[in-house]
Every structure is written in structure tokens, then in C-alpha cells.
Image: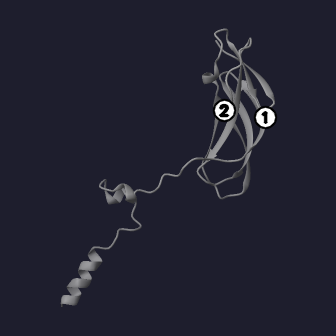
Amino acid sequence: MVSIVFIMGCWGCQNQKGLPMEALGSELSPSMMPPVPAWEQASFEFISAEVEGDSLRVVVQYGGGCGDHQFSLVESGPAMKSLPPKQPIALVHETTGDPCRALIEETRMLDLSSFRRSPHGTTVILLESLILPYSYD
């Protein structure tokens, strides 16, 4: 009889593996939370770019197909003091990890408004070997 109580007691205390995190309640310790994947830079091929309003339309190719990918624009040097000013930028590709090997080609629209360098309404964007006039109000 004692062994039956002991077995029932152990069975009632088993871990709740397989349940969704919401079912376990909000009293989870940080060690029980699933890890948040880190974004890391990844390779890609730059195909083309053109300015459309306050956006840069870029066509890129990269390997993957089953993970998250994001592209962003960053300054790759200080704005040049010319008329109009010239701002060198770089396109950055980041992923949380993508083990798939499909060749993805896609068009992305990226915001240029943070690269406005002139009160006169024009900044020249320098991206790789491209010279792209960016006009704004």
C-alpha cells in the first residue's frame, strides 16, 4: 500500500513538458522561458536599388527560406560636406538562423528619412557603387 502511495505521489509531481507556455501560468522563472534568438549578420547579394519617395527599393538575394530575415540601412561614414551633401550608407542583412538553402530573391522597401542631410531638399545617397539622388520636402 505504501508503494502505491509513493508511486502516485511521484506521478503527480512530474514535469509538465509538452504544454504550451501559457498553460503553465505567469509564475515562470527566467530560466524556464524559451531563449530569444539573437540576430546575427548574414551574407547576401545586392542586386539593385532605386529611390522611391522616402524609401529605398532594394533587390537582394540570400540563402535560406525557413527563418526570419531583416534588412536595414546604416551610415557607413560621415556625411560629406558638399552641395548637395553626400551620405555613404550600407545595407545590412540579419537573421536569427536559417538552416534552409533555397536561393531567395526579394524586393525590400527601406526608410530613407533618417538620412536627410540638407535643408534644401536633396541628399545624395552613396550605396556600394551607386550614386542615388534623394529629394524630399
Could you tell whether 122 is left or right of 7 in the image?
right
State yes or no: discs 1 and 2 in contact (Cβ < 8 Å): no
Q: Residue 69 location, x and y as percent?
A: 62, 46
Q: How packed is label 2: few (under 14 Cα within 10 Å), some, or many (20 or more)?
A: some
Q: Residue 44 location, x and y as percent?
A: 73, 45
Callout 1 amino acid:
Ser
Could you tell whether 46 is left or right of 13 in the image?
right
User: Is the residue 133 above or below the residue 16 in the image?
Assistant: above
Foreground of the two, 42 or 113: 42
Instruction: Indicate the secondary structure of the residue bearing disc 1.
Output: strand
User: Is the residue 10 above or below the residue 76 in the image?
Assistant: below
Q: Residue furthest right?
A: 129
Q: Which residue is mark 2?
A: 109
Q: How packed is label 1: few (under 14 Cα within 10 Å), some, or many (20 or more)?
A: few
Instruction: Indicate the secondary structure of the residue bearing disc 2.
Output: strand
Q: Residue furthest left?
A: 1
* Disc number placed over residue 48 in the picture, else none: 1
Callout 2 amino acid:
Met
